[in-house]
Image: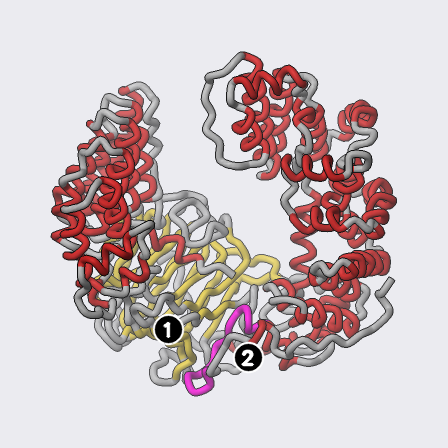
Amino acid sequence: MTRPWSILAGSLLLSVSTAPALVSAAQSPGESQVAALLAPSPDIEAIRAFGPAVLPVLAALYGRSDAARRTRIAWTLYSLGWKSEEAKRVLMRDVHTDDTDLRLQVQWALGRVSNDPDVVETLVDNMCNDGNPLFRDKAACALANDQIHLTEDQKLRLFQGLVDALRDDKLQVRQIALKALQIQTGQTKSFDPAAPAQAREAALQEWTRWLDTYRSHL
Amino acid sequence: MARHLPLAPLATGALAAVLTLAASPSNGAAEGPVSPVASSTLVTYSFDDDTLAAGPDTFAVFEKAKGRVHLSSAFRYSGYRSVEIRDVAGDGNFPELQGYFPLRDSGTLYAHFALLVADPGEQLNIALAGPEWFSMKKGGIAFWLQTRGGWLCQYSDSIPMRLIQVRPFAWYLVDLAYDVTAGTYDLAIREEGRSDPLVALKTQPNAFNEPGSPVDKFSFIGDNGHDTSNVDYFVDDIVLTVDRPIPMAPFVAPGRRKLFLDTWNDGLTSLRSKPSCLPAIDLADFGLGTDAIEALKRDGLLPVLEDLIDGRPARISDRGSPASVRALQSVLLWKGGCGALLSGDADTALERFSKAKEILPGGTLFETSAVLSLAALGRWNEVDVRLAGLDAAWKDDPRLPLLLATIGLARADLDSAERPLRASAARVADDPRLECALVALSKDLDLPLVDRVRSRFPADWRSCLDAALLPEEYYHVLLARRSYSDAGRYAARMASRLGSMNLPTAPWVEKMGDAAFLEKDYTRALARYQESAGRGRPGTALMLKLSDVHYLLGDFEKERSYREAIYGSLHEERDHPPDRNLKGGSPEGSAEEETDADHP
């Protein structure tokens, strides 16, 4: 027998406040202690056992690490899924890096450490305007799957950004924005990213109406 | 609301009568099919009687961590009990009452239940869903209620919409009329003691605005996977009805309208009767000769091709020589055709196999797959003509018996399915080569494995592959022909052969049990099932077969133990078992009584 509701556990349809407070925090760990758990690959469960007190330590380590360790720390922050202002601050420094591994981990981690509006704005901007199609695609993935702390108001802004991106000149951007919307809402409203602009307009109007309805229920 | 549902008294007496009747072994499916009775009531639970049997046609209870689903007399809307669902945040799981009813893919489904929440600030979720479970697509969630920050909300058109602020410890009566075809519903919510509805909505788009989204299950849980809820709530008087009566088979045993073994066996028959692609065992299957393979090597594309064939993720590019690109294109088409065939779209499959064959005309596997598509489409004249052509090309191929058997099964010609398998399958049961037995157990016949077999037994590698391809098919064909004794003997020979090599025998011992069960020798079936269970952690299917066989032997306590090990149970809190996990999955240990009847 499966636990079918768990299919939705990763969905962003619902507002979540994954609570670090639920974790029984132990004593504040030392940097060397945490650093030892990051190599060769992060021991997530051991790091999680420190509780939220580990977050400032990880952020501080991040600021003094090379790209490889920053990548591992970003992955760790992603895995923990705990909100952290310090973590968001250091991750945002690398949100435009050209280092592929680091960029992907940072884009994925941001929505799992923060629900600040500039996180979604930056990811939407990367999705639409980054010169590298891979980074654009993975920014869309992050918007689709990893914005776990958003309130309903913030979610509306995310949807607005994705619907706006359906008007982008680049086919790939329209495709990935639609995919993110589909993951978030289960719907496409029959929008065909590859159709001529005129043909896309009707479905765009549907999405716009849907946004208005969503807004009216906040 | 399109229709008012009677609230009380509920038809608990009818349910009790059905389950009581089902408690008699003489009513079992083993005595033959019982005619369905037309009914417009799919589900009715008031939780007051003591015959609430969990099962695939009633409900399941999940209490995997600290959360609980209990019968409770603390609060009830009618009668003297309700169900209490209590979640515990941070315990790693969520409790659930999940109910099942016949699939509704048209017409109107009416649902009614009473709900009382102790702390509306905590999250709960209630849903109606279909075969795609609780997913955000057609066939997934159709109707969804959730509490959020003290509000009861509905999800309609993917939008959470507040309905009412929930008062703690107040009973709310929810009435839903879901028009499956339109994908819309009417919703009314009343509070106990008030005549005017708090909510009276018409023609709401379903959860994800999917017209035609079918439903076959309901669910009551705490939070939906984020593990943050400490909700405690009560549900009573669940009633599901339909606008037009539908045939409903009677219960043949507690919680099921069909014995578990019959359900399992029917599923297997359906699966095996559906033609699907045969495995590739050589690149020559795709018409790739030495030159083409060399070209692929030179282009660095041979590993990509092998990944494609074996279903591993592969990155396709259009670089490479025209010959290499053709090879990749044809195999891609073949894989796509196999996927289509598996999903029941034989027309698309045939089209893809034909295109693949156009690109690489020497690919016999393309032709074989096309023949299987034709069989799936029932175009038997074409099957016969093209099969004759294949017969020569595949004369010595170990897959030919399997191809013929598959076609025989699809044609429901069981003699022609059994005949080609008989000799080879018998040889497998006597094959002393350990390596070949290991091939059979690997369950993963890919090109590297075939190469290893070929290098180990260069003179007779084909018969070694028989071990992987034929025994289960042969056994199944024997069951399909109702040759249960032969099937049991064959399973015993296979078990004996594997046992003599110190290899796992439990699956074949279980098959011996299945054959005995179908022969209505329940005592022998029980012995074999117990023996199989004692040789490893029994899977769900085996547990449920044990439940069936105990039921048919009149041991209702063990029937219940095995069934509830899978489906859980509804009980009062004071009766909650200290450890619901049965040791080793078997309520009665690992008795290995010996009977000789099915030994070779």
In percent of width and height, residue B322 lies at 54, 12
Q: CA distance from mark 1 to mark 2?
A: 23 Å
Q: Secondary structure at mark 2?
A: loop
Give the residue drawn at x 79%, y 58%. Answer: B491
Q: Mark 1 touching mark 2, by CB under 8 A?
A: no
> Three-letter amino acid code at disc 2?
Thr
Give the residue drawn at x 81%, y 42%. Answer: B417
Residue numbers of the magenta segment: B563-576
Vertical placement of residue B314 versus B436, above or below: above
In percent of width and height, residue B562 lies at 60, 73
Q: Quadrant of residue B66?
A: bottom left
Asked if the magenta segment contains residue B129, the reply would be: no
- Label 1: few (<14), some (14–19) or many (≥20) C-alpha neighbours in 10 Å: many
Give the residue drawn at x 36%, y 49%. Answer: B206
Residue where numbered disc 2 is placed: B51
Residue where numbered disc 1 is placed: B67
> Three-letter amino acid code at disc 1?
Gly
In the image, is B288 to the left or to the right of A126? right
Quadrant showing the C terminus of chain B: bottom right
In percent of width and height, residue B443 lies at 65, 47
Q: Residue furthest top?
A: B322
Q: Which chain is home to disc 1?
A: B
Vertical placement of residue A70 versus B80, above or below: above
Q: Which chain is home to disc 2?
A: B
In the image, is A116 to the left or to the right of B211? left
Give the residue drawn at x 24%, y 45%. Answer: A69
